[in-house]
Image (tube, helix red, strand yellow):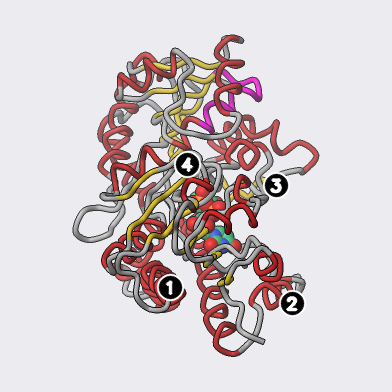
Amino acid sequence: MRITMIGTGYVGLVSGACFSDFGHTVVCVDKDEAKIEALGRNVMPIFEPGLDDLVLRNVKAGQLSFTTDLAAGVKGADAVFIAVGTPSRRGDGHADLSYVFAAVREVAQAADTPIVIVTKSTVPVGTGDEVERIVTEAAPAKGIRVASNPEFLREGAAIEDFKRPDRIVCGTDDEGAREVLRGIYRPLSLNQASPILFTGRRTAEVIKYAANAFLATKITFINEMADLCEVAGADVQQVARGIGLDNRIGGKFLHAGPGYGGSCFPKDTLALLKTADDYGTPLRIVEAVVSVNDARKRAMGRKIIKALGGDARGKTVGVLGLTFKPNTDDMRDSPAIAIIQTLQDAGALVRAYDPEGAEQAKKMLSNVEFVEGPYAAAQGADAVALVTEWDAFRALDLSRLAGLMKQRILVDLRNIYPPEEAERAGFEYHGVGKGPV
Ligand code: UDX
């Protein structure tokens, strides 16, 4: 199959590279000349494990190419995927669909075959109908069909997620479009490894938002349980295991922590609320999730201040991990930002280390001393706060860390270390959802 991918962000680049690895011929298009030029030199615009090798291999094999010329990229395609950004619209939180609509118009005008336009960007229910209207207006007689194919990959595990998804969702009622999508996803669905779920287009659009909102709800639920455990003398990790072993609940996404962040959950839950309001069906549970999670980030900053005895003025806090999760350099809506700002507002000095996120973090935070490595962050500090569970923080020499500090306070917002282990190393340990017994 010949596939064109419009947009080389996380979803577009990973999907395009993986499709090419499955033997399809893929052209990735982006308006950003610097990005396309860098990709031509195999310099990735994002940090994602394994992506540079995957891209290089397929470029060399002639299966994958990059261009800024959309019209040329669309020529001869069977399917054109739209994977441009749908950021929160300034002011109202609705998904900004202007990039999607602009791309669709250009694609429709450039098409020289009866392509299927497939929306991979996360878009509110009903967007496919608008896309179809644009296509009919821009290219009435080309036989172009419009489908929805949401993407569920996670940053940091993007290639694995794309190649072995739990399911593939394709929303279209058009049999020809289904045939094209079946052909594209055949390598993934062989032996029923990843089932393809064919639905109506609007249903596919809702599935994507519902999945993200449900996962955000699960995280927020266990975070609130953690708060209860802390005051009630219980252990949230055991609670998570105790409920997660029930197959109806499932053990994933039950890790209590500083609140969810990233490029998807915060933006998509907000956009879902807006859409639901427009339809006159407010989603009360999701509303609560959004506000509980927002409040949690600063609350985690206050938790660190409390561990310092309630006064952070003039004290130094070493922050380990800045990105919203490990294996990415993505700082978007990372809890670390609100945590650090809360500490600074209370007069603390912050010293921070992150294996990949420091460059992004420098653009978003001021007056933070960025250092190289966890031990440098702990040097002379009054407390160390573990904010992101990078593997590099899982096997720290805790005695050495404690030995470098002024006060030996460890606030482990990801529950990486068993309290006894930290206490043996001389720490006063504060986890999440671990109440005094
Ligand atoms: C998410 C969805 O998982 C993915 O399907 C969708 O396509 C995009 O949004 P991503 O944002 O890359 O992916 O990260 P994810 O691993 O889902 O984590 C999101 C946030 O939730 C992180 O801040 C993470 O730390 C937090 N989280 C996750 C928890 O706090 N506890 C958990 O148990 C799981």
Q: CA distance from mark 2 to mark 3?
A: 30 Å
* Mark 2: few/some/many CA within 10 Å (<14, 14-19, 20+): few
**Label 4 to label 1, Cα distance in Å?**
54 Å
Residue that badge 1 annotates: 308
Q: Residue at x 71, y 44 (%)?
A: 194
Q: Amino acid at mark 2?
A: Gly
Note whether 265 is above or below 57 in the view shown. Answer: below
Which of labels 4 and 1 is toward the front? 1
> Distance from label 3 to label 4 (Cα)?
18 Å
Magenta residues, dominant SS class: helix
| Amino acid of disc 4 | Ala
Q: Which mark is residue 147?
A: 4
Residues at marks 3 and 1, CA–CA distance in whole angstroms: 51 Å
* Magenta-drawn segment: 14-25
Q: Quadrant of residue 339?
A: bottom left
Residue 203 appears in the rendering: no
- Amino acid found under the numbered disc labelled 3: Pro
Q: Secondary structure at mark 4?
A: strand
Q: Is residue 110 above or below residue 350?
A: above
In the rendered image, residue 389, in percent from the top left (x then y), is placed at 57, 53
Q: Decide which of 339, 404 is in the foreground and name it.
A: 404
Q: How many marks?
A: 4
Does dot 3 land on a helix, a strand or a loop?
loop
Membership of 22 in magenta stretch = yes
Please say if the residues under marks 3 and 1 sit with CB atoms less than 8 Å apart. Answer: no
Lower position in the chain sequence, tag 2 or tag 3 = 3
Q: Which mark is residue 242?
A: 2
CA neighbours of label 1 inside 10 A, class few (<14), some (14 to 19), many (20+): many
Q: Which residue matches tag 3?
A: 195
